[in-house]
Amino acid sequence: MAMSDELRSIQEMVERGVREASSLEELEQLRISATGKKGSLTAIMRSMGKLAPEERPAMGQLANSVRSGVEEAIARRKAELSRAALEARIQADAVDVTLPGRRLSQGTQHLISQIREEIEDIFVGLGYTVEDGPYVETTYYNFTALNAPEDHPSRSAKDTFYVEDRAPEGKATHVLGESDVLLRTQTSGVQVHVMEEKEPPIYMICPGTVFRPDTADANHLPQFTQVEGLVVDEGITFGDLKGTLDYFCREIFGKDRATRYRPHFFPFTEPSCEVDVSCGVCHGKGCRFCKNTGWLEILGCGMVDPNVFSYVGINPEKYSGFAFGIGVERVAALRYDLPDLRMLMTGDMRFLRQF
Ligand code: DAH
């Protein structure tokens, strides 16, 4: 092929390549193959010396113009491709600064934790200590040392979650031993632990979770929260119990709510009572919320039974005391007129955000 034809065919090839190149890398390959050290155009320029002297000027001129044409075409395409690449990157990285920011929602304490801490604050203010106890107990701490008789119905597997069921095979019930393991049904067992470890005077509360095999409904939960209280000192009377719990009720529900002490039975206290607070919905007149009684029950209490003292080696001739157990979910329901305790367990943010 004549050199001029060769030059033109290189020019055509490069121009086509430039048109078809879709990336900067492809374009660079094309440049190297034409004007690089081992490129086709470079090779022709080098062979210029072999031409007859009279052919050289025309051929040299042609080769130079082909080279500058090729270089220019590559440079132009390179600018185009670079702009496109930059454009694509800007598109991909685009941040729309006019969009509203994504707010990180800040967590808050659950209503039950708030009220539990509020109850703690009230009693810490009266000089009580805050104790802790195990969720998994033995029958000794949950029942026996709390003076519950062997045949007390609350000991049955219908009312207590047993972790280890030691009933003889084929028998539904059995007399439970002292070492049967269960999920505590009440925080009262902590009274026994504390009295075993500390000498009177004792002024303590213990908040914590308790468990009962109840189906959840508007008024029951299989897992709920109690705050146990225990006072053991010389000369403690029912007047101390009433003064303390009246103060607690006023602090937590406000001064306009009345309290009522209703006789009741608990194995570990004598005498015992349940404390009701006047209904916040009807202010004592009677409504659906309080089942037309005007009152709502929030805690059990009483004077510590001397039998309980004898289990832990405290002299009932020298010391007396009172105990109480507050239902924290009940307190929440009463304070905020909640129609259904299950609202406290479902984690529905529309409900929880209100507190
Ligand atoms: N443990 C009782 C319950 O779960 C509540 C209770 C009543 C606790 C009287 C006490 C008490 O300390 O003295 O129903």
Image (spheres, helix red, strand yellow):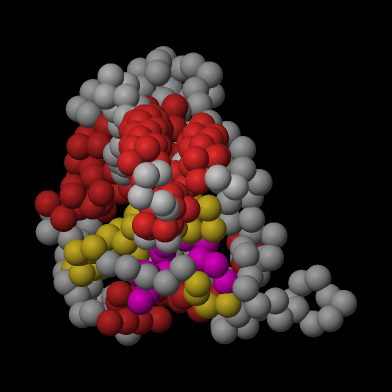
**Residue 223 visible here:** yes
Please, is residue 34 above or below residue 292 in the view?
Answer: below
Report x, y in % for residue 6. Answer: 53, 44
Pick the front one: 225 or 287: 225
Left or right: where 280 falls relative to 140: left
Is 65 on the left-hand or right-hand side of 156?
Answer: left
Front position in the image: 212 or 10: 10
Count up the numbered dots. 0
Q: Indicate the quadrant where residue 58 lies.
A: top left
Please name the residue shown 25% across and 76% down the image: 317
Residue displayed at 52% across by 61% down = 185
The furthest residue to the right: 170
Quadrant, the C terminus: top left
For image coordinates 33% across by 47% down, the residue present is 113
What is the magenta range? 182-193
Let me know if residue 183 is in the magenta part: yes
Q: Is residue 58 above or below residue 194?
A: above
124 versus 194 height, above or below: above
Residue at left offset 25%, top offset 37% = 252
Indicate the position of residue 239 as horizontal and vertical percent values.
21, 50
Relative side of 161 to 64, left or right: right
Q: Position of residue 87 (x, y in %)?
A: 36, 30
On the question of residue 355 being in view, the answer is no
**Image position of 179 with respect to 10: above or below:** below
Rendered location of residue 40, percent (x, y): 47, 53
Which is more toward the observer, 226 or 75? 75
The quarter holding residue 201 reads bottom left
In which image quadrant can residue 124 be found? bottom left
Q: Is residue 225 left or right of residue 149?
A: left
Question: Is 281 a magenta residue?
Answer: no
